[in-house]
Image: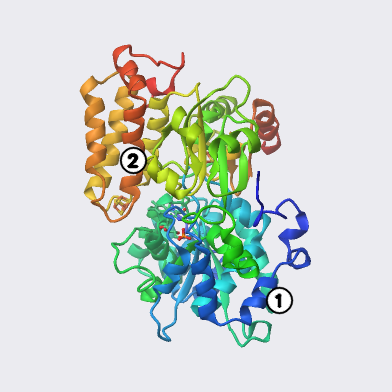
Amino acid sequence: MSKKLELPSASRAYIKKELERYETKESALIPALFEAQKVFGFITPEVVDLLAVEMDIPPSRVNEVAQFYTMFNKKPVGKHHIQVCTNISCAMVGARETANYICKKLGVKLDEVSKDSRFTVSQVECLGSCGTAPMAQINDDYYENLDQQKIDKLLESLK
Amino acid sequence: MEVKLLSEHYDKKEFRHLEGYQKLGGYSALKKALKMKPEEIVAEVKNSGLRGRGGAGFPTGMKWGFLPQNGEPRFLLCNADEGEPGTFKDRLMMERAPHQLIEGMIIAAFGIKSQKSYIYIRGEYYQPYKIVEKAIEEAYKAGLLGKNILGSGFDHEMDVYRGAGAYIVGEETALISSLEGKKGQPKLKPPFPAVKGYLEKPTIVNNVETLAAVPWIINNGAQGYKKYGTEKSPGTKLFSVSGNVNKPGVYEVPLAYSFKDLLENECGGMKPGFKLKALIPGGSSCPVLNYDEAMKATMDYECMSQMGSMLGSGGVIVIDDKQCMVDLLNVLMHFYHHESCGQCTPCREGTGWMEKLSSSIGAGRAQLSDITLLDKVARQMMGTTICALSDAAALPVISFVSKFRDEFEFHIHEKKCKVKGHCHAQSHH
Ligand SMILES: Cc1cc2nc3c(=O)[nH]c(=O)nc-3n(C[C@H](O)[C@H](O)[C@H](O)COP(=O)(O)O)c2cc1C
Ligand code: SF4
Ligand code: FES
């Protein structure tokens, strides 16, 4: 039995404001998708349809944007999405080992949601933090110069 | 030695807010600029020789001069999509000096007669986004943005826009499409954005660092700027240095500064136990230099092009002797394949092929002829596509293979790594 999706009124008000903020309303698609992701966790076809109606933009246009950008999750992720950069500068100082260490500590594989739904660990491309590597982005924040001790403490604080 | 024309106050907390920024001399250039004629601003920037810091190094004043000379509305876009691996200076500039960028943008907008600008920030830079958003708010409250700025009669609106993850959006036409609420795919040029850009209107796209240099140039004049660097590479540049050096970070030095000095003085040399092996001088898309070349290199556009590389975004990636070049190339090829937008066949297919070939070489599942094939695939990708990502993916391949061929051969012949006992290249998917 599926419940009909609904946006909270604060989100609807935010999207309404974004629709008027730019020269054309299509520019509000990215902000609206971020908002929807905050509410629903990830972007499903139902979320796309909901936004299409809310914004009076064809679902195919909404979907095109949702699919193109990597920050829009197409499947569930844990409450804390730990994204470790493993591009060149980070790889040289051991970021892939960092990602493995975090996975092992949490008992998860890459890109999988932990059983308690709290964590997902992913490897991502350069996050502009190459001089303070290894690093991870967890939701909106950067954590830099990571070593095992720091990671242990960090994961503890996120539990 | 560092020469901090732009970054002098970056360590001061107060510089991040309007009041402190003004106390330290901020917005004096804007006041001066508003008393000049717009044409004089464009001329000053042209005469300074400032070159775009986003990667291509195109002369900024000349780009501004491409705008049609009519009353048509035009836009200014700041490219803060910073995604070139090894580059992290724009992030620092926005975090430490958001008003320097905003001031530079208002002056640029006045010069090119634009009434609306956007700062397009990559989605991952959430904190910089919040900082810039707040700074714009401060500027509005102080009458530095909006109608009749500081009583000059000039109106300008500025807004900030957050991207959502896609390296390719850093390419200027893709950036424009993304801001229009579309997929961020590049478009064929011409028409150039200066003629037909955002919403089909004339549009100037400039990098964060380019625009942030404008206030200094207006305050100190083109001649003042040209005291630093060389004839073709005037001024200073912020280099982002990463790798196993003692003090990685962002350093502002005059252009034509020697890499050896940058490494030894600013970065405190290599970390104990590490030796320099190679250098990618300007972000991951630039051809790699070997040790001898690196030690002779000066950080300017001319020297880099003479050495067959590029200054790019100034992402200085220092490669040490504990790194396997096959492994690092694998990492880069995975990246470019993932980031190719897929519109052009040579790029879409080529990046896929190069990732496959370099990973099978790493895994020892290849023949010597595959090294030649890898090089050939790369060469066929060059100069035939809509945007420069295809070339950006091919150039590292050609240079890695020609300068470090022994490491590639070792992986094939010995089925193990010449450099490390445990090499990721052997198990790369
Ligand atoms: C694949 C690709 C990615 C790019 N990424 C960026 C970027 O992240 N930031 C940037 O300023 N320029 C980037 N550029 C260059 C822009 O297209 C454009 O040249 C630049 O923003 C112009 O500003 P400038 O003249 O001030 O350098 C990229 C180009 C390509 C081909
Ligand atoms: S060169 Fe590659 S990234 Fe650029 S437009 Fe073509 S397919 Fe897309
Ligand atoms: S390479 Fe990892 S943050 Fe840039």
Frontmost residue, B388 versus B182: B388
B18 vs B243: above or below: below
**Ligand 1 rendered quadrant:** bottom left
Residue A86 in view here: no
Frontmost residue, B61 versus B144: B61
Question: x and y percent of residue B223 in the render?
Answer: 58, 65
Give the numbered dot on residue B141.
1
A17 vs B239: above or below: below
Frontmost residue, B52 versus A73: B52
For disc 2, does the CB lie below 8 Å from ligand 1?
A: no
Quadrant housing residue A9: bottom right
Question: What's the CA distance linking mark 1 and mark 2?
Answer: 48 Å
Disc 1 element = helix
Q: Is residue B322 left or right of residue B151?
A: left
| Amino acid type of the residue that numbered disc 2 sits on in the rendered structure | Leu
Count residues near mark 2 (Cα–Cα under 10 Å), then give few for <14, some for 14-19, many for 20+.
many
